[in-house]
Image: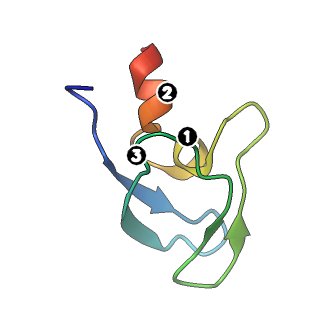
Amino acid sequence: MSGITLQSIITCPVCGHSETETMPVDSCLHFYECQGCGALLSPKSGDCCVFCSYGTVPCPPKQNIV
């Protein structure tokens, strides 16, 4: 699993708050609570997780495909 980035910055589409998070290596994260406004984020249609929808880096399982 070399070359996999585990840090991603999630930006809330509701309030714009950004937070650096460590992504799980072997699974997708389907829900994320914004640390700024408390909004519960879920993936956009067609995305597997919140990192793919709102993060600067896609999740590790998606990185393995690319």
Judge the density around disc 1: few (<14), some (14-19), many (≥20) Cα neighbours within 10 Å: many
Q: CA distance from mark 2 to mark 3?
A: 13 Å
Residue that carries the numbered disc 1 in the rendered image: 52
- At x 70% / y 48%, what residue is drawn? 43
Q: Which mark is residue 16?
A: none
In the displayed orientation, state which residue is furthest to the top: 66
Residue that carries the numbered disc 2 in the rendered image: 62
Q: Tell me if 23 is positioned left or right of 4 in this view.
A: right
- At x 27% / y 26%, what residue is drawn? 1
SS class of the residue under badge 2?
Answer: helix
Residue type, numbered disc 1: Cys
- At x 52% / y 81%, what residue is drawn? 35
In the rendered image, which quarter is residue 9 located in? bottom left
Q: CA distance from mark 1 to mark 2?
A: 8 Å
Judge the density around disc 3: few (<14), some (14-19), many (≥20) Cα neighbours within 10 Å: some
Q: Position of residue 48 (x, y in %)?
A: 66, 36
Q: CA distance from mark 1 to mark 3?
A: 8 Å
Residue type, numbered disc 2: Lys
SS class of the residue under badge 3?
Answer: loop
Asked if the residue under mark 2 is in contact with the one under mark 1, i.e. CB atoms within 8 Å, the reply is yes
**Is 8 located above or below residue 18 in the figure?**
above
**Is 55 located above or below residue 20 in the figure?**
above
Mark with earlier residue (2, 3): 3
Q: Position of residue 11 (x, y in %)?
A: 50, 62
Q: Position of residue 49 (x, y in %)?
A: 62, 44
In the rendered image, which quarter is residue 14 located in? bottom right
Judge the density around disc 2: few (<14), some (14-19), many (≥20) Cα neighbours within 10 Å: some
Q: Which mark is residue 56?
A: 3
SS class of the residue under badge 1?
Answer: helix
